[in-house]
């Protein structure tokens, strides 16, 4: 698979359809936010007639407004002055440091310990679920422009998570019998060769890990590079590994990340979904709500329909996290709720499995149930779907109504009885 980045994207034959100003913006912003795009994406997903207005273009290529004007000018001036790569990198690092790279306090709050040692390649936020970041899987075939783990791809980043010892993972699991689910994430674990992935998965099939019932793979590969499951050099070995997991009576879930119906409509992706379902893999899909990409009820309705028809269970509609170019992609919470309500009301019960809008924030996963009126005042009804404190899950609570709020930190308790949830 061929990839394009800051240093070779101008070789694309489609680039001639962009203006000089648009190309200049890519050159500047890509110095701050990582940029990489797969051949499948540029050839099958982007409608180049629309150029920068195409949703898949927005999802992958940098845009001028992803940076504050003064930050854009800083990088622009350094480039025009012929500054050294060291000077440009230093300026970019300073800008990134203000973009909330450690979103939701992941490094401070989620890293588990074993025998008084931190396990930097794992996160254990919720009692039943362990996140594992295999070292070889900390990359993606395409780097989404909105990714909340964008700092995983910055050269020399101190925020990077990666696990290098499958043995440590198994030792931790043996010590925590409450864990039922292991989620391999990144990056994208399916960027790994099958042999490397197997080193992490096979220990979970042993009697020592019998309490692990669900193995999840968080991946964009179905959208960005579906040939991984069809004709890649080790695609047959990957499918055999998946069958082996099923044979060990573990439930294998591929948690696909879908942004737009166009991703599900390519012949390659549809064939990959068919093949995976034949192996017994459970397909699940989650979607971040993003301005300019899918913040439209008609688009969301089609997305829920398409993935359900392909056997991908609609799982979550997320609010974009408060990191990176968040201001460029953010949607007010009230508008997000309306988009969810309008889109879900048009589909059958099978597609209404999607839960949203959901904020995955520091205290947990919080679903927005919508506004309500209490006397002469308005409030916002909320619930925890997951929480660091399991006793909070499922209990309704209220926040003060704020039609400009775009994230959890913008909300305030409605009354004294709601304060424990904040």
Image (cartoon, rainbow, N blue to C red):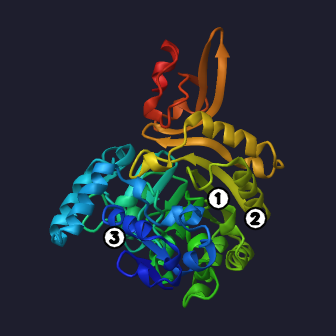
Q: Secondary structure at mark 3?
A: loop
Q: Which mark is residue 164?
A: 3
Q: Secondary structure at mark 1?
A: strand
Residue at mark 2? 311
Q: Which mark is residue 341?
A: none
- Report whether 345 appears left or right of 117: right
Q: Earlier in the sequence, mark 1 or mark 2?
A: 1
Residue shown at 42% from the left, 44% from the top: 322
User: Label 1, label 2: how many angstroms apart (C-alpha)?
Assistant: 10 Å
Residue shown at 45% from the left, 36% from the top: 363
- Identify whether 146 is placed above or below 230: above
Residue shown at 63% from the left, 9% from the top: 376
For residue 169, which quarter of the picture?
bottom left
Rendered location of residue 418, percent (x, y): 51, 19
Q: Of 340 and 197, which appears nearest the observer?
A: 340
Rendered location of residue 100, percent (x, y): 33, 47
Label 1 crowd bin: few (<14), some (14–19), many (20+), radius 10 Å: many
User: Label 3, label 1: how many angstroms apart (C-alpha)?
Assistant: 28 Å
For residue 181, which quarter of the picture?
bottom right
Rendered location of residue 380, percent (x, y): 59, 25
Q: Secondary structure at mark 2?
A: loop
Q: Of 331 and 234, which appears nearest the observer?
A: 331
Q: Of 173 and 398, which appears nearest the observer?
A: 398
Residue 153 in view here: yes
- Identify whether 279 is placed above or below 252: below
Number of labelled discs? 3
- Report whether 380 appears left or right of 160: right
């Amino acid at each position: 698979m061929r990839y394009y980045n800051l240093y070779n994207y101008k070789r694309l034959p489609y680039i001639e359809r962009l203006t000089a100003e648009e190309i200049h913006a890519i050159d500047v912003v890509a110095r701050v936010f990582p940029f990489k795009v797969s051949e499948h994406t540029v050839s099958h997903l982007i409608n180049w007639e629309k150029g920068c207005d195409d949703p898949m273009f927005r999802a992958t290529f940098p845009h001028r407004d992803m940076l504050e004007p003064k930050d854009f000018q800083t990088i622009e001036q350094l480039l025009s002055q012929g500054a050294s790569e060291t000077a440009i990198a230093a300026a970019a690092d300073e800008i990134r440091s203000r973009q909330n790279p450690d979103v939701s306090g992941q490094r401070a709050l989620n890293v588990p310990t074993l025998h008084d040692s931190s396990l930097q390649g794992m996160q254990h936020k919720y009692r039943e679920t362990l996140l594992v970041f295999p070292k070889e899987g900390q990359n993606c075939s395409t780097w989404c422009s909105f990714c909340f783990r964008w700092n995983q791809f910055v050269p020399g980043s101190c925020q990077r998570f990666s696990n290098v010892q499958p043995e440590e993972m198994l030792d931790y699991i043996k010590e925590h019998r409450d864990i039922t689910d292991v989620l391999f994430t990144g990056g994208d674990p399916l960027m790994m060769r099958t042999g490397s992935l197997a080193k992490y998965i096979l220990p979970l099939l042993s009697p020592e890990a019998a309490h692990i019932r669900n193995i999840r793979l968080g991946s964009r590969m179905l959208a960005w590079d579906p040939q991984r499951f069809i004709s890649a050099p080790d695609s047959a070995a990957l499918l055999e590994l998946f069958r082996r997991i099923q044979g060990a009576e573990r439930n294998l879930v591929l948690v696909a990340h879908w942004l737009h119906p166009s991703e599900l409509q390519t012949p390659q992706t549809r064939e990959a979904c068919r093949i995976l379902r034949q192996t017994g893999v459970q397909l699940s899909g989650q979607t971040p709500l993003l301005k300019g990409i899918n913040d439209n009820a008609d688009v969301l309705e089609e997305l829920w329909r398409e993935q359900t028809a392909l056997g991908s269970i609609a799982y979550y509609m997320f609010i974009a996290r408060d990191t990176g170019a968040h201001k460029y992609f953010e949607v007010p919470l009230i508008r997000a709720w309306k988009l969810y309500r309008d889109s879900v009301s048009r589909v059958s019960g099978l597609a209404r499995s999607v839960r949203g809008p959901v904020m995955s924030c520091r205290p947990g996963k919080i679903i927005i149930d919508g506004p309500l009126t209490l006397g002469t005042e308005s409030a916002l009804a909320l619930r925890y779907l997951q929480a660091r404190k399991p006793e909070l899950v499922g209990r309704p609570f209220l926040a003060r109504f704020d039609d400009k709020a775009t994230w959890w930190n913008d909300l305030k308790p409605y009354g004294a009885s709601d304060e424990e949830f904040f």
